[in-house]
Image (cartoon, rainbow, N blue to C red):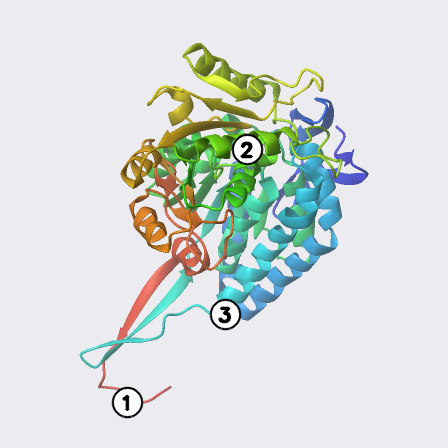
Amino acid sequence: MKTTATVAGVGVDTRHWIGGRRTGSAATFTDVSPIDERPIAEIARGTGAEVSAAVQAARQAFPGWSATPPAHRAKILNAIADGAERRAEELAQVETCDNGSLLRSHRRGVMPRAAHNFRFFADWLGRLGPGDLEVEGHREQVSWAPSGVTAVITPWNAPLMLATWRIAPALAAGNTVVAKPPEWAPLTASLLADITAEAGLPDGVFNLVQGLGGEAGAPLAAHPDLARVSFTGSVATGRKVAAAAGAQLTPVSLELGGKSPLLVFADADLDLAVRHAVGQYDNAGQVCLAGTRLLVDERVAGDFTARFLERAAALRQGDPRDEATDVGPNITRAHLERVDGFVQRAVAAGARALLGGTANHALGGLYYRPTLLAGAKPGSEILTEEVFGPVLTLQTFTGEDEAVALANSTRYGLAATMFTGDRGRAGRVSARLVAGTVWVNCFFVRDLRAPFGGARLSGIGREGGTWSFDFYGDVKNTVYAPEGWRSDG
């Protein structure tokens, strides 16, 4: 069986990474590029056997890694960041071919952020500790102990960045990791395994099992020897992961779907609001945080819509490797058909397509035109369910109460974006929005020190800064009596 693939001129090992060595499987699955729907690699197809081997390797490596001084763990994580920075162009080229995201985005933001994830948590490791507490003369000392083997299961829309966002704090906390990359875009995870080895990460501390969700992801989430499970993906799969981990009482962190609102009040800077609203088509709409529901004050709705349509019409759709491209393909044929199904059902139910509404037949393949739908009935599917494609909806409101009611009218609560020139309104409305993150007059600004996560069906838990260590570590409180010491030995 061929064990490497050449993608964008980069050699990628297509086998698993278990216990510090490459391991194949009896079967493979085909990795297809969404750019042109051509096969680019045959990937080792892991099952429960490979999962068990990886968890066992991680368990064997845990005592040594957990006992490694934090400063030395941080040194290795910084070396991983250095390796990711050196290979940033390779990572960008491979991931663009693998998942169809824009090459310019990978170069400018995504791959630098993947490297930064390791550097940030390496640095944060040295800052842990809220300081000693005191009660009735007793000193209470808070610490974070490594918890064990962590499973990291990640999605295809930003596979490397979202993986490193979980792998880095898990390793920093002293845990060992078994990662399962998405079957639709697994290649940069394999390159990450090479980078960790080159950085001197001990064998078995990071392991990679590739495969399909039901064959590799399911047995991983259910494995009894895990200490933590971190999952990013759909609500449906998140339920399965939570149920599997729950049977073992394994703590889980879930970042799931979104149906986020983008509110525009009459006193907003409309040019700013329109620019960010059109920006929601980024990554062909395959972004969980995207503000896909445009909620606009009826007094400026006409002006906003005209400006939006003008700006959106100028978007260039095409090959994501072209620096001039603004909107690339959707990930698979099945996903494209799912997106189109949402649009056609909405139109059949009375919604109007002000923009797009069909696949881009001029380009063929997996390209769906940026779409804006108006006139959908309240509570309809297109307004309440996650499409995960380049499809936005437009609704109007008459005041703050109606705006908040519309914004909170789904089962999700991942994020919300708001544009207003009134600081008082910004505070009032953001306090009432059900969302893990609220952006005011901006979008997608994120400090890794801040908590991130969702409400309702958008997830369980928060990660970022100390919140990540709260999840990946076992938080311990040691209480010292004020008297009775005979020596400091």
Residue 124 is situated, as x and y percent measured from the top left of the image, at 50, 65
**Rendered position, 67 above or below 40:** below
Disc 3 or disc 1, which is closer to the eye?
Answer: 3
**What amino acid type should be assigned to the residue bearing mark 2?**
Phe
For marks 3 and 1 on the same chain, the one whose residue lies earlier in the sequence: 3
- How packed mark 3 is, by other alpha carbons closer than 10 Å (few <14, some 14-19, many 20 or more), is few
Residue 172 is situated, as x and y percent measured from the top left of the image, at 52, 60
Residue situated in front as seen by the camera: 366 or 175: 366
Check disc 2 and report the residue beneath it: 308
Q: Kindly identify which numbered label has been placed on residue 126.
A: 3
Disc 2 or disc 1, which is closer to the eye?
Answer: 2
For marks 2 and 3 on the same chain, the one whose residue lies earlier in the sequence: 3
The reply to whether discs 2 and 3 touch (Cβ–Cβ < 8 Å) is: no
Q: Mark 3 falls on what kind of element? A: loop
Q: Residue furthest top?
A: 348
Residue 409 is situated, as x and y percent measured from the top left of the image, at 32, 31
User: Can the viewer see residue 65?
Assistant: yes
